[in-house]
Image (cartoon, grey):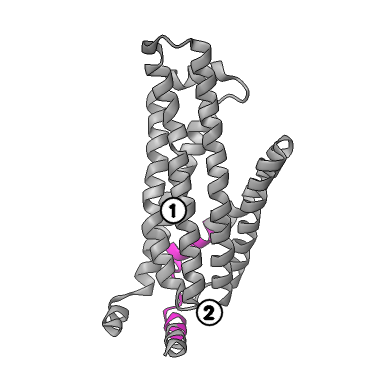
Amino acid sequence: MPERHHAEFSPQVAARLAGLLYLIVIVAGAIAEIFVRQRLVVANDAQATAGNILAHEQLFRWGFVADLVAGLCVIPLIMLLFELLKVVSRRLALVALFFSLVGTAVQSTALLGHFAPLILLKRGVALSVGQELLQAQTYMALQLQGIGYAVALVFFGGTMVTRGYLVIRSSFLPRAIGMLLMAAGVCYITNSFVDFVAPAIAGYAMALLIVPGIAESSLCLWLLVKGVNVARWQEQQAGEEATLR
């Protein structure tokens, strides 16, 4: 059975599919964050934020859907990356997989904070709740979503560090991308903890997220365009199987 499984698995097809899914995750996440939340949320102004959400309700709903689509695509993506990288070290590939699963679960739960403003602003009035209170609750719900995302990024940071190390140890993907991924993981974790313990300078720490953007885009494009070196992947697969025997 194991031999049949390996015969059916194509690392090149898996790499290209992973690259496509990664691209969807990146684009969908960018739409939700840059073109929806950053466009509609006004810093420290609950009234203006609530007004923007009501005035652009459909756009706000599409932002929620974009984030949800990204979360759906992450699951098959991390499974494909696990299949590709487990030939380097199955245990470390599993660690990266579990980090991603936990991060995705936290991020998906935090996504409720995106939808909460629609419930508050549209149904709160029917319950005779004051406008100022609803606007404040709306703004705080979005802030809680941001904290939830920061928690998720800690786990994604663990994923990046582990996955980056696996890529460096692999012979079928560029080591430079692995180094970028490890740096991205450190930046994710640092940015989140600054947000938790020193919110006054959190805005400056956001600049650190440029590194993950470069790292993940590089891996995405490499997988999509170049794929993996199949011969070297097969060599490492044979070596890993020999170790397990």
Towards the viewer: 159 or 176: 159
Identify the residue shown where x is 37% and y is 26%: 58
Query: Label 2 crowding class (10 Å Cα cut-off): few <14, some 14-19, many 20+?
Result: some
Residue 149 at least partly seen: yes
CA gap, disc 1 and disc 2: 23 Å
Dot 2 amino acid type: Ser
Q: Is residue 80 above or below residue 109?
A: below
Q: Secondary structure at mark 2?
A: loop
List x then y, in percent, for residue 239: 46, 88
Dot label at residue 3 = none
Identify the residue shown where x is 39% and y is 23%: 119
Q: Which residue is mark 1?
A: 23
Q: Quadrant of the C terminus?
A: bottom left
Main SS of the magenta part reads: helix
Q: Is residue 51 above or below residue 173?
A: above
| Magenta span | 217-236
Q: Which residue is mark 2?
A: 171
Towards the viewer: 128 or 239: 128
Is residue 203 rendered magenta in the image? no
Q: Secondary structure at mark 1?
A: helix
Is residue 218 rendered magenta in the image? yes
The quadrant where residue 180 appears: bottom right
Residue 56 at least partly seen: no
